[in-house]
């Protein structure tokens, strides 16, 4: 049975994916300019996503693995396909670990990491086995609720805002701005390469560019608003906070009625983290199914999900500090190999070899 | 004890999936599924037997850092 999702569903799913773990994690730029780096990062993400769209347009109804197998042949194509599978698997494990770390550090310090990771992994496995249509419908329901919560938190925080917290407006040069902006582009915007496996499910024959680009721009604006809000509310403390959104929400106090609203940030992380991990699990399972040439990806979802959980629990030898360092210093160098270099090579080879042939069926 | 429970869960999952695939006559799917299940079981067993699993992300971090230093 062929699964189909609409443009709107794809847009919501992509927005939920981008919001994912970025809702609670912070960038590496100084507080007052972090929102600018989010916007510049979104623009870089947009540029990179255009490679994905070009590939998707060129090879209608084909996922990244099928494109690689077509462009490089059935044997040589296995190498980029395997790299793509391993990247989505690793990214899924990384997001799962971020999720566990957040709850372990900010909410329930005494509980083991597996206590948070396993229930979410079960939910993701169940959702992915139900199919991408179910996941897309869940996104249409969950993303607007998350947006509503973000808007509410932003409004409730108005009494805490200090304009002086946003000064100096531009404390570093343009050159220094590009490094954290690139970090933002790599996490989370170019991670949308996982959607190369989702785009073939798009029901309309029209371009996949509109929903994907809209989601990236909306995601950039959303992250800019969140980082601006956190900077205005937290001031100099922002740089020291591991989870700025959580810390900012803790400041909300409306007439002793609305207090301790940081749990709303946690609930946002649960829902958007669920969408992001599910999309990555779907991409990893589907790519592995296409590599192994099986009829359905559904039978592979559970073992691939177990691999993600194992990666989340054992990926780092020294826990959170190492994880944060990896996100800030290693990921911006390591991720482009898979998110920029790999699709660019595939596109260039396809153009040079004129694949697919114009008169091909 | 925990490893025995995990192994039992694995066996149950594989049997349940296999029955469906055999009924549909998808023998290659069955082989591929068993291989992937086996691959996912190896690190789980290593953790349970306290052998320890190679920390992938830590290794990548060290490698990138070393390359950046050069």
Image (cartoon, helix red, strand yellow):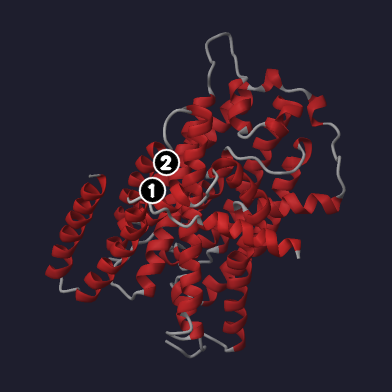
For the N terminus of chain A, the quadrant is bottom left
Task: Report which residue position mark 1 lands on.
Answer: A137
Q: Is residue B46 left or right of residue A195?
A: left
Q: Is residue A334 left or right of residue B49?
A: right
CA neighbours of label 1 inside 10 A, class few (<14), some (14 to 19), many (20+): some
- Seen at 15% across and 74% down, the residue is B25
- Seen at 66% across and 44% down, the residue is A221
Residue A132 appears in the rendering: no
Q: Nearer the viewer, residue A233 or A159?
A: A233
CA neighbours of label 2 inside 10 A, class few (<14), some (14 to 19), many (20+): few
User: Are the residues flagged by discs 1 and 2 from a single subunit?
Assistant: yes
Q: Chain of mark 1?
A: A
Q: Is residue B18 left or right of residue B51?
A: left
Q: Chain of mark 2?
A: A
Q: Nearer the viewer, residue A41 or A115?
A: A115
- Seen at 53% across and 64% down, the residue is A208
Task: Classify mark 1: helix, strand or loop.
Answer: helix
Task: Classify mark 2: helix, strand or loop.
Answer: helix
Q: Which mark is residue A141?
A: 2
Q: Position of residue A48 (x, y in %)?
A: 64, 64
Residue A357 appears in the rendering: yes
With respect to residue B25, does A130 lie above or below? above
């Amino acid at each position: 049975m062929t699964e189909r999702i609409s443009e709107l569903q794809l847009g919501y799913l992509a927005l939920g994916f981008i919001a994912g773990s970025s809702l609670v994690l912070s960038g590496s730029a100084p507080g007052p300019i972090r929102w600018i780096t989010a916007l510049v990062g979104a623009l870089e993400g947009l540029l990179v996503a255009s490679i994905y769209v070009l590939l998707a347009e060129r090879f209608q109804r084909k996922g990244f693995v099928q494109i690689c197998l077509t462009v490089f042949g059935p044997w040589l194509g296995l190498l980029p396909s395997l790299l793509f599978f391993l990247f989505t698997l690793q990214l899924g494990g990384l997001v799962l670990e971020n999720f566990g770390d957040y709850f372990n550090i900010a909410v329930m310090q005494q509980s083991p990491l597996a206590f948070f990771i396993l229930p979410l992994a079960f939910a993701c496995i169940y959702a992915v086995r139900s199919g991408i249509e179910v996941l897309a419908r869940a996104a249409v329901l969950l993303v607007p609720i998350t947006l509503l919560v973000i808007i509410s938190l932003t409004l409730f925080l108005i009494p805490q805002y200090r304009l002086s917290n946003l000064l100096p407006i531009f404390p570093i040069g343009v050159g220094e701005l590009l490094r954290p902006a690139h970090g933002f582009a790599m996490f989370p915007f170019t991670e949308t390469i996982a959607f190369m496996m989702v785009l073939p499910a798009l029901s309309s024959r029209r371009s996949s560019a509109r929903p994907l680009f809209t989601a990236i721009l909306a995601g950039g604006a959303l992250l800019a608003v969140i980082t601006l809000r956190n900077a205005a509310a937290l001031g100099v403390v922002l740089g020291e906070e591991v989870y700025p959104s959580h810390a900012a929400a803790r400041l909300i106090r409306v007439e002793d009625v609305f207090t301790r609203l940081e749990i709303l940030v946690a609930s946002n992380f649960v829902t958007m983290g669920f969408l992001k991990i599910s999309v990555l699990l779907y991409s990893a399972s589907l790519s592995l199914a296409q590599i192994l040439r099986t009829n359905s990806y559904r039978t592979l979802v559970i073992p691939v999900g177990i691999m993600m959980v194992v990666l989340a629990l054992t990926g780092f030898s020294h826990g959170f500090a190492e994880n944060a360092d990896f996100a800030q210093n290693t990921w911006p160098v390591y991720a482009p190999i898979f998110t920029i270099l790999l699709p660019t090579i595939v596109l260039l080879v396809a153009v040079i070899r004129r694949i697919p042939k114009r008169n091909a069926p | 004890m925990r490893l025995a429970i995990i192994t039992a869960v694995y066996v149950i999952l594989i049997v349940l999936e296999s029955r469906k695939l055999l009924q549909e006559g998808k023998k290659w799917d069955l082989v591929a599924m068993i291989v992937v299940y086996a691959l996912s079981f190896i690190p789980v067993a290593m953790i349970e037997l306290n052998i320890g699993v190679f920390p992938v992300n830590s290794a990548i971090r060290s490698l990138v850092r070393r390359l950046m230093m050069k």
